[in-house]
Amino acid sequence: MIELQRVDKTYTRPTGETIRALAEVSLRIDRGEFLAIVGASGSGKSTLMNILGLLDVASTGTYLFEGRDVSALTVAEQARFRNTKVGFVFQAFHLLPRTSALENVELPLLYSDRASIRGFGLKALEAVGLADRTHHTPSELSGGQQQRVAIARALVNEPDLLLADEPTGNLDGQAAAEIMAIFQNLSESGRTIILVTHDPDMAAHARRVVRLEHGRVVADDERPTFTKPVDITQSRERR
């Protein structure tokens, strides 16, 4: 589904100094893969995720998505690609504070070209075990529940690719495990997921782990087994 060919990304600081964030990164990612990208701070993980999600573009190299060179898309085409093809989950939940869980989840649908959005938001909340929290505002939800809402929002347009950047970074151990269980269940259902993390325990939930150092891929390992997914709809966090 995804092919990166010798992708470089450089930034120029106000001082004129050039920083090479990615160096000749080449990757193939098949549909349905659950891939973790790991590395220390400054290794290029988030830069790579931003390029995959067209939040940024490579300085040189090629990015093919389903055989199409998406690095050459116009700004409007990039926006449509992000809305229809990619769902984003970040460390900060980015929920509207005075808006219900359902309304937060339905927000991306307002920018879609669907004839009707009825039922999509509730379906996405059901997928993350929050069908009983549709009318709760973020202040009425725990951190783990807020991240579930954010995942539901990422899923609501039924994207081909789910990108998660340190999605458990603001959560305690129990909530983090439940979030990873959601990603595993989504993977088992055929969703393509790319997880960016510095935490090896979180990366261990993925079936493939790519390690970056100084902007370069230094390891790419398939994992024969990973933790069995659990039914998160049966678990409830402390309020």
Image: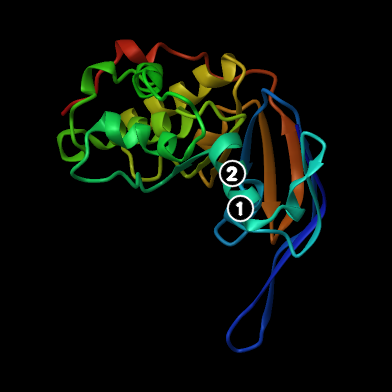
Q: Which percent across, then down, holds residue 187?
A: 58, 21
Q: Which percent across, then down, holds residue 92?
A: 36, 48
On the picture, is 222 further left or further right than 238?
Answer: right
Relative to 119, is 176 above or below? below
Residue at 41%, 38% (x, y): give it: 110
Question: Can you identify the residue that label 1 sits on?
Answer: 76
Q: Amino acid at mark 1?
A: Ala
Between 178 and 55, the residue placed more toward the observer is 55
Are the residues at dot 1 and dot 2 in contact (C-beta closer than 8 Å)? yes
Q: Amino acid at mark 2?
A: Arg
Q: Which percent across, then down, holds residue 141?
A: 20, 33
Q: Quadrant of the C terminus?
A: top left
Q: Secondary structure at mark 2?
A: helix
Question: Can you identify the residue that label 2 sits on?
Answer: 80
Q: How many marks?
A: 2
Residue at 18%, 30% (x, y): give it: 136
Crowding at mark 2 (Cα within 10 Å: few <14, some 14-19, many 20+): some
On the picture, is 59 further left or further right than 139?
Answer: right
Q: Which percent across, then down, holds residue 11?
A: 66, 73
Residue at 38%, 21% (x, y): give it: 128
CA separation, marks 1 and 2? 6 Å
Q: Secondary structure at mark 1?
A: helix
Relative to 214, is 98 above or below? above
The color scheme shown is rainbow
On the picture, is 84 further left or further right than 138?
Answer: right
Between 170 and 114, the residue placed more toward the observer is 114
Crowding at mark 1 (Cα within 10 Å: few <14, some 14-19, many 20+): few
Quadrant for residue 82, please give it: top right
Outermost residue, front direction?
A: 115
Relative to 52, is 21 above or below? below
